[in-house]
Amino acid sequence: MNNPLQKVVVDTCGWIEWLTDGVLCDQYASYFEEITHVIVPTSVQFELYKWVCRVKNKEMALEAVALTKQGNVQSLSTSIALLAADASAEYKLSFADAIIYASAQACQATLVTSDDHFEGLPDVIYFSKKNR
């Protein structure tokens, strides 16, 4: 990570890239060097668990979620839900994307992602899969 004191939320796609040694794994790897500094919204845990169950199995999904618990898990609160509603309206984000983005905002963290829905939004580091 460029700045070890920088707070980050790694989006679900980043977790998947890192865990599967995907094409963007190297871009995400530095954010996982100090996993205790990564903020993990519970909605990322939901999406990651669901994805791993679908492509692998429930045991591997539980192992993935156990890794996320080494980070700083951020539960959904009323204030985050309201921030998410505002972000959803302003940036046309889906429910899950808005919750993840609002969780980063609430923690004054940078969102690190390769999800096209976040490209160009404030306080986002975006890694494009295009031209890979």
Image (tube, grey):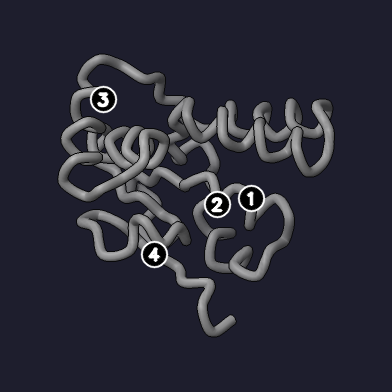
Residue that mark 4 sits on:
126
Give the distance between the C-alpha atoms of the residues marked 3 and 4, in whole angstroms. 22 Å
Work out how far the residue at label 1 is from the one at label 2, CA to CA, in angstroms.
5 Å
Residue 15 vertical placement versus 80 (above, below): below
Structural crowding at the residue carrying mark 1, measured as other residues with C-alpha within 10 Å and reported as few (<14), some (14–19) or many (≥20):
some
Whether label 3 touches label 4, CB < 8 Å:
no
* Three-letter amino acid code of the residue under disc 2: Cys
Q: Determine whether 38 is above or below 112 in the image.
A: above
Q: Where residue 16 is drawn, which disc sits there?
A: 1
- Looking at the image, is mark 4 or mark 2 earlier in the sequence? 2
Q: Position of residue 116 (x, y in %)?
A: 41, 62
Residue depicted at 54% across the width and 60% down the height: 28
For the residues bearing labels 1 and 3, Cβ distance under 8 angstroms: no
The amino acid type of the residue labelled 1 equals Ile
The x, y position of residue 56, in whole percent, is 83, 40
Label 3 sits on what residue type? Ile
| Of callouts 2 and 3, the N-terminal one | 2
Do the CB atoms of the residues marked 1 and 2 lie less than 8 Å apart? Answer: yes
Say which label, 3 or 4, has the lower sequence index.
3
Q: Which residue is mark 3?
A: 80
Residue farthest bottom in this picture: 131
- Cα separation between marks 2 and 3: 21 Å
Q: Secondary structure at mark 4?
A: strand
Q: Image quadrant of residue 22?
A: bottom right
Q: Residues within 10 Å of mark 3 (few under 14, many from 20)?
A: many
- On screen, residue 41 versus residue 19, left or right, reads left
Residue contact between numbered discs 4 and 1, judged by CB atoms under 8 Å: no
Which residue is label 2 attached to?
A: 13
Q: Quadrant of the N terminus?
A: bottom left
